Image (cartoon, rainbow, N blue to C red):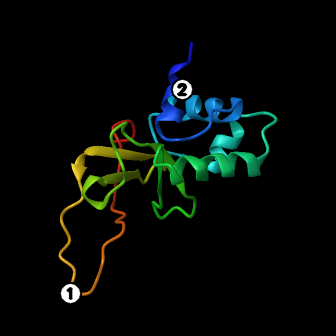
Amino acid sequence: MKSDSEKKLETRNIKPTAMRELVLKVLSEQTAAISLSDLEQKFEKADKVTLYRTLKTFEENKLIHSIDDGTGSVKYALCKDSCLCNPNELHVHFLCTKCLHTYCLNDLPIPAINLPDNFVLETINMVVKGKCHNCK
Protein backbone atom coordinates (compact mmCIF):
# COMPACT_ATOMS: atom_id res chain seq x y z
CA MET A 1 0.00 0.00 0.00
CA LYS A 2 1.34 3.43 -0.97
CA SER A 3 1.94 6.12 1.63
CA ASP A 4 0.35 9.56 1.38
CA SER A 5 3.71 11.05 0.40
CA GLU A 6 4.17 8.48 -2.39
CA LYS A 7 0.71 9.31 -3.72
CA LYS A 8 1.38 13.05 -3.51
CA LEU A 9 4.66 12.68 -5.39
CA GLU A 10 3.15 10.45 -8.07
CA THR A 11 0.25 12.88 -8.55
CA ARG A 12 2.87 15.46 -9.59
CA ASN A 13 4.73 12.94 -11.79
CA ILE A 14 7.66 12.73 -9.38
CA LYS A 15 9.26 9.33 -8.86
CA PRO A 16 9.11 8.54 -5.13
CA THR A 17 12.50 7.96 -3.51
CA ALA A 18 13.36 7.74 0.17
CA MET A 19 14.98 11.20 0.13
CA ARG A 20 12.07 12.81 -1.72
CA GLU A 21 9.62 11.35 0.75
CA LEU A 22 11.69 12.60 3.69
CA VAL A 23 11.96 16.11 2.21
CA LEU A 24 8.21 16.15 1.51
CA LYS A 25 7.54 15.10 5.11
CA VAL A 26 9.72 17.92 6.48
CA LEU A 27 8.10 20.47 4.14
CA SER A 28 4.61 19.36 5.15
CA GLU A 29 5.46 19.87 8.83
CA GLN A 30 6.50 23.52 8.36
CA THR A 31 4.28 26.43 9.36
CA ALA A 32 6.48 28.87 7.42
CA ALA A 33 8.50 28.66 4.23
CA ILE A 34 11.94 27.08 4.61
CA SER A 35 15.31 27.84 3.00
CA LEU A 36 17.73 25.26 1.65
CA SER A 37 20.12 25.88 4.55
CA ASP A 38 17.30 25.45 7.09
CA LEU A 39 16.25 22.24 5.35
CA GLU A 40 19.84 21.02 5.35
CA GLN A 41 19.98 21.41 9.15
CA LYS A 42 17.05 19.00 9.49
CA PHE A 43 19.08 16.21 7.87
CA GLU A 44 22.28 15.04 9.53
CA LYS A 45 23.86 13.28 6.57
CA ALA A 46 22.07 14.66 3.54
CA ASP A 47 24.11 16.16 0.73
CA LYS A 48 23.27 19.80 -0.01
CA VAL A 49 23.30 19.11 -3.76
CA THR A 50 20.79 16.27 -3.33
CA LEU A 51 18.50 18.49 -1.28
CA TYR A 52 18.79 21.29 -3.86
CA ARG A 53 17.99 18.92 -6.72
CA THR A 54 15.04 17.54 -4.77
CA LEU A 55 13.68 21.06 -4.24
CA LYS A 56 14.19 21.91 -7.93
CA THR A 57 12.38 18.72 -8.98
CA PHE A 58 9.51 19.56 -6.62
CA GLU A 59 9.36 23.11 -7.95
CA GLU A 60 9.48 22.08 -11.62
CA ASN A 61 6.58 19.71 -10.99
CA LYS A 62 4.64 22.34 -9.03
CA LEU A 63 4.65 20.50 -5.72
CA ILE A 64 6.33 23.50 -4.07
CA HIS A 65 6.89 27.12 -4.97
CA SER A 66 9.87 29.34 -4.28
CA ILE A 67 9.68 32.70 -2.57
CA ASP A 68 12.19 35.51 -2.95
CA ASP A 69 11.32 37.47 0.17
CA GLY A 70 14.24 39.90 -0.07
CA THR A 71 16.29 38.28 2.71
CA GLY A 72 18.88 36.97 0.26
CA SER A 73 17.81 33.36 0.77
CA VAL A 74 15.15 31.76 -1.42
CA LYS A 75 12.53 29.93 0.62
CA TYR A 76 10.23 27.07 -0.35
CA ALA A 77 6.68 26.10 0.61
CA LEU A 78 4.25 23.39 -0.44
CA CYS A 79 1.63 24.27 -3.01
CA LYS A 80 -2.02 23.42 -2.53
CA ASP A 81 -2.94 20.08 -4.10
CA SER A 82 -4.88 21.76 -6.91
CA CYS A 83 -2.29 24.48 -7.60
CA LEU A 84 -0.55 24.69 -10.96
CA CYS A 85 1.27 27.94 -10.08
CA ASN A 86 -0.46 29.90 -12.81
CA PRO A 87 -0.36 33.68 -12.30
CA ASN A 88 -4.06 33.72 -11.34
CA GLU A 89 -3.37 31.16 -8.57
CA LEU A 90 -0.48 33.03 -6.97
CA HIS A 91 -0.83 34.44 -3.49
CA VAL A 92 0.74 37.07 -1.26
CA HIS A 93 3.61 36.16 1.08
CA PHE A 94 4.33 37.76 4.45
CA LEU A 95 7.86 38.28 5.80
CA CYS A 96 8.13 38.92 9.53
CA THR A 97 10.79 41.58 9.98
CA LYS A 98 11.54 40.33 13.51
CA CYS A 99 11.84 36.50 13.25
CA LEU A 100 12.41 36.49 9.45
CA HIS A 101 9.86 33.72 8.88
CA THR A 102 8.02 33.87 5.57
CA TYR A 103 4.39 32.76 5.46
CA CYS A 104 2.09 31.93 2.55
CA LEU A 105 -1.11 33.94 2.72
CA ASN A 106 -3.04 31.49 0.54
CA ASP A 107 -6.35 33.33 0.94
CA LEU A 108 -4.91 36.61 -0.38
CA PRO A 109 -4.56 36.49 -4.16
CA ILE A 110 -2.16 38.85 -5.83
CA PRO A 111 -4.11 41.73 -7.41
CA ALA A 112 -4.60 41.61 -11.18
CA ILE A 113 -1.85 43.31 -13.14
CA ASN A 114 -2.75 45.02 -16.41
CA LEU A 115 0.39 44.95 -18.52
CA PRO A 116 0.91 46.99 -21.68
CA ASP A 117 0.27 45.32 -25.03
CA ASN A 118 2.95 42.85 -26.12
CA PHE A 119 3.93 42.05 -22.51
CA VAL A 120 3.26 38.52 -21.20
CA LEU A 121 2.88 37.82 -17.50
CA GLU A 122 4.67 34.66 -16.36
CA THR A 123 4.97 35.02 -12.60
CA ILE A 124 4.52 37.52 -9.80
CA ASN A 125 6.19 37.76 -6.41
CA MET A 126 4.43 39.90 -3.81
CA VAL A 127 5.88 40.09 -0.30
CA VAL A 128 4.26 42.08 2.49
CA LYS A 129 6.51 42.89 5.45
CA GLY A 130 5.63 43.42 9.09
CA LYS A 131 5.44 41.46 12.34
CA CYS A 132 3.83 38.01 12.46
CA HIS A 133 1.33 36.78 15.05
CA ASN A 134 4.17 35.48 17.27
CA CYS A 135 6.26 38.67 17.16
CA LYS A 136 3.67 41.45 17.32
Disc ID at residue 68: none
Q: Would you say residue 35 is visible in this rendering?
A: no
Q: Residue at x 67, y 51 (%)?
A: 52
Residue at left 79%, top 44%?
A: 47
Give the structural element (helix, strand or loop) at label 2: helix
Assign a secondary structure to mark 1: loop
The answer to which quarter of the image holds residue 78 is top left
Against 72, residue 42 (above or below) is above
Left or right? Give the position of 49 relative to 3.
right
User: Where does the image place residue 42, in percent across and percent down from the top left?
Assistant: 68, 34
Q: Percent x, y for residue 70?
A: 47, 65
Q: Give the spatial CA distance, label 2 vs label 1.
A: 43 Å
Label 1, on which residue?
117
* Quadrant of the drawing holding the N terminus: top right
Q: Is residue 87 left or right of residue 68?
A: left
Q: Which residue is mark 2?
A: 5
Identify which amino acid the numbered label 1 is placed on: Asp
Determine whether, in the image, residue 8 is placed left or right of residue 92.
right
In the visual, does 15 lie left or right of 8? right
